[in-house]
Amino acid sequence: MTLSNVPVCADEALPLLAKAIHEASLCEDIYPQVILKTKVPLIKFQHKHSHIEVDISVEAVDGKDNSDEVIRLMNLFPEARVLTVIIKYFLQQRDMHEPYRGGLGSYATTLLVISFLQHHPIYTIHP
């Protein structure tokens, strides 16, 4: 998730937001992880009730464009959805899904799957 129109820089906003998330009891017992030394600074935490992993960034200018492109590519290659979920699960099981620790994030994983399908059309449902 990317927050827009935040009146302060990410270095200020993210620690404040992490504190608010913790005080609102939205995350598990662990305090939200604030990661500032990356290309896109973010907060990581697991939602308390759904157990969904959440990443929040501030003012990531390319986020909307990237999301639009992923939607377009997923519509073009519908089989990519299932393959992407399988690869993401595979990476998560091996603790290789965090880009800031040298792994592949969701965007890179999605592009990897799309590239595979583009270069190996035998695996697609296109005629």
Image: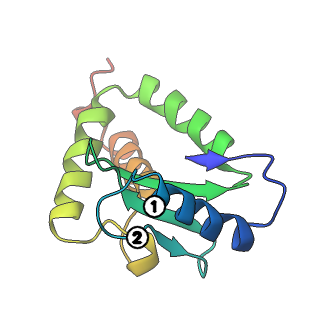
Q: Position of residue 113 (x, y in %)?
A: 34, 47
Residue type pointed to by label 1:
His
Q: Name the disc covering residue 33, or none.
A: none
- Of 20 and 96, the residue lying toward us: 20
21 lies left or right of 87: right
At 40% across and 40% down in the image, what residue appears? 118
Q: Secondary structure at mark 2?
A: loop
**Callout 2: 10 Å neighbours few (<14), some, many (20+)?**
some
- Above or below, 39 relative to 3: below
- Above or below, 77 relative to 12: above
Corner quadrant of residue 16? bottom right
Number of numbered discs on residues = 2
At 47% across and 51% down in the image, what residue appears? 24
CB atoms at circles 1 and 2 under 8 Å apart? yes
User: Is residue 122 shown to the viewer in this render?
Assistant: yes
Q: Name the disc covering residue 31, or none.
A: 2
Q: Quadrant of the C terminus?
A: top left
107 lies left or right of 20: left
- Above or below, 41 relative to 61: below
Question: Can you identify the residue that label 1 sits on?
Answer: 22
User: Is residue 40 shown to the viewer in this render?
Assistant: no
At 74% across and 52% down in the image, what residue appears? 61
Residue projecting furthest to the front: 23
User: Gap between marks 1 and 2, in whole Å?
Assistant: 6 Å
**Callout 1: 10 Å neighbours few (<14), some, many (20+)?**
some
- Of 81 and 52, the residue lying toward us: 52
Q: Position of residue 83 (x, y in %)?
A: 24, 41
Label 1 or label 2, whichever comes before in sequence order: 1
